[in-house]
Image (cartoon, rainbow, N blue to C red):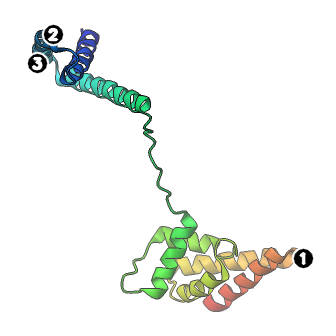
Amino acid sequence: MLEEMVSKSVDLNRNESLYTCGELDSCSFSCQFVATKAVEEEKELSAEERRILERKLKKERKKEEKKLMREAGISAKKEETKKPSGSELALEYLTSWSENPKDWKFQKTRQTWLLLHMYDKEKVPDTYFSILLEYLEGLKGSAREVTVQKAEALMKEYDSADLDDPNLLNKCERIRQVLQLLS
């Protein structure tokens, strides 16, 4: 029964749109009859059945609209908005902290990202690293303790490693700066 109503309602929508365009002048009586019948049958539906019927009708209308737009040569592509990456958000957070402290608001996720990636020169460039060192001066509690512990562990690991790699040298230098600041 529901499938019949959906097909009748879809036919009704098509007939109504065609009639309003003036292509079906002789069909006004049948359209009104089908519309009246569909409304009466719709009253007999439960709320769930009505919701399902409305969703199916909406889906059919959208298909018809897309088809008409394709025929008219209009593309219906939606532009995707580019979301800023974690690094961009974290560096923006750091800049906001240094340039506009009144409007700055603490964000745990941004601080965590900065603490995890502060030794990577590609993710936190030198210009931001100096600001990050200032930010780290105010670091308190377990975040400060954990940062010192991780820096010490990394320093021990890199002391035993071969320091021929320039990236490794940069990391070691940053670790030393963090340890000097926080210890």
Q: Quadrant of residue 149?
A: bottom right
Relative to 181, is 22 above or below? Answer: above
Please report the residue visible at 46 percent of the width from the left and 83 percent of the height from the top.
Answer: 97
Residue named by callout 2: 26
Kind of residue at badge 3 = Lys
Sequence-wise first label, 2 or 3: 2
Q: Quadrant of residue 17?
A: top left
Relative to 125, 163 lies left or right: right
Please report the residue visible at 23 percent of the width from the left and 26 percent of the height from the top.
Answer: 51
CB under 8 Å between callouts 1 and 3?
no
Residue named by callout 1: 164
Depth check, front residue: 106 or 104: 104
Relative to 76, is 12 above or below? Answer: above
Sequence-wise first label, 1 or 3: 3
Sequence-wise first label, 2 or 1: 2
Depth check, front residue: 174 or 90: 90
CB under 8 Å between callouts 2 and 3?
no
Q: Secondary structure at mark 3?
A: helix
Kind of residue at badge 1 = Asp
Residue 43, labelled with which disc? Answer: 3
Q: Whole-percent x and y of residue 29? A: 10, 10
Depth check, front residue: 145 or 108: 108
Kind of residue at badge 2 = Ser
Q: Quadrant of residue 116?
A: bottom right
